Image (spheres, rainbow, N blue to C red):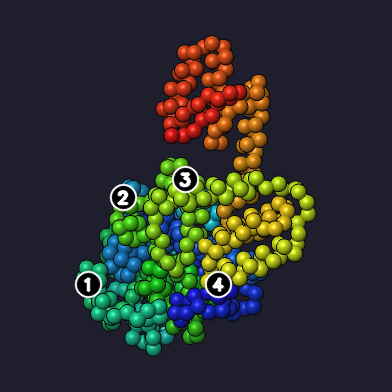
Amino acid sequence: MQLYNSATHKKEEFTTHTPGRVEMYTCGPTVYHFAHIGNLRSYIMEDALEKYLRYEGYDVNRVMNITDVGHLSSDADTGEDKMLKGARREHKTVMEIARFYTDAFFDDCRKLNIKTPEVVQPATGLIDEFIKVVQGLMDKGYAYFAGGNVYFDTSKLDRYYVFNDHDEEDLAVGVREGVEEDLNKRNKNDFVLWFTKSKFEDQALKWDSPWGVGYPGWHIECSCISMKYNGEYLDLHCGGVDNAFPHHTNEIAQSEAYLGHPWCRQWFHVHHLNSDNGKMSKSKGEFLTVSLLEEKGYDPLAYRFFCLQSHYRKALVFSWENLDNAAKAYQKLVKRIAALKPADGPVDQAVLAEYKATFIERVGNDLNTALGVTCLYDALKADTNDATRLAILDSFDRVLSLSLLDKAAELRAKEAAQARASSASGGFTVTGEGDPEIDALVLRRAEAKKAKNFAEADRIRDELRTRGVEITDVPGGAVWKKI
Ligand SMILES: [Zn+2]
């Protein structure tokens, strides 16, 4: 496939160190709070990328960390420890917070059809490995001990900025973060590999190390976890675009210094989800979660559909109106698929192969999932039988993961159940918007009227009205709609 590589700033032919196998790494969540849907956009697009690579026939080994220690609120070496902040907020221990939000993250992933990576490694489970790599960097002269912490010395590198040409002045600590400069650092971009001089009196998680009792910096986690499970040559590293600097920049610095050779070939960065007034973040108070979408009546997969409709390298603007449009389009798509007849003949393999080739050509061009979605509509219009159309849709959904055939089967079953319900009621037909509970109420109202129990009939009508449902009596039945 052709994939944009943030490290070379261009679209390139995707390659791997070992033919046919992709070593893939994803920066996982810092588990101090729920993931907001902006974070989850990255995981959705990375999931689509992994599934696309599998679709092309690659074997993928995907590794992800869970950050449960060491991530400070600035993403650099300043601010509060995010995990401690979460623990204090909820009056729990750091490990309780970590367990709770790790589970919550994977619940969200399940609802969004995001596959769990082959390896998921909490940072606190690999401390010995971090110490080994930090010691290695000390031995090679890339790290130094100052003021109680171990720092990476960025002046030892030929090239530090990989993803962009930062104006160094803009990055001056104190200007950018509004915090005091760390005077232990020899160069302002040096970063902490191991903290022993804890800034926090109540730092709960500490381990012995050659430099004293302490804990790892955030950046070293990802390098070590990847080197352990992906090996020395990483093919593809993923993350949100805000991780490019300093996190990924520091990962490259320490990994290549430690290994003594180039480390990761391709860097995949997903851009922000913005709200009307800028980037969505937890600190801004606009905290949209998957649970909130569900509370408002959205299928989480409608959000996945919404994300797939736009390119990962463009900022995506979230609004309820935009999500509504995506949800309606998704429902309509499922309805059209439900109308296909699953067993109307054999699958035409030649047509299926032809459509698959087009899908690969389109989606394989820098993960163009929006065109992948268009391919679904093309499949519905394909000049072939329904069985072949369904086989094409099923094939594309291995990458898009919208549960299209399952949802269509559910809808078909629901419609069949409704048809049964109406025939069982003496030919009284309820036509509505596909909610069996409301259909049942409408039927009960009809039965009450038939039995001349008008008080009960009126009561049901009122109940339906409070639920926002309007009924119109028609010959031989009733029609209801949500108002
Ligand atoms: Zn990372």
Ligand 1 under 8 Å from disc 2 Cβ: no
Amino acid carrying mark 2 in the image = Arg
In front of the other: label 3 or label 1? 3
| Local secondary structure at mark 1 | loop
Amino acid carrying mark 1 in the image = Gly
Label annotation for residue 89? 2
Q: Earlier in the sequence, mark 4 or mark 2?
A: 2
Q: Which residue is mark 1?
A: 174
Q: Which residue is mark 4?
A: 365
Q: In percent of the image, x 59 and y 78: which residue is there?
A: 16
Q: CA distance from mark 3 to mark 2?
A: 29 Å
Amino acid carrying mark 3 in the image = Tyr
Left or right: residue 208 versus residue 125 is left
Q: Earlier in the sequence, mark 4 or mark 1?
A: 1
Q: Residue furthest top?
A: 452
| Local secondary structure at mark 4 | loop
In front of the other: label 3 or label 2? 3
| Local secondary structure at mark 2 | helix
Q: Can the viewer see residue 365?
A: yes
Q: Are marks 3 and 2 in contact (CB under 8 Å)?
A: no
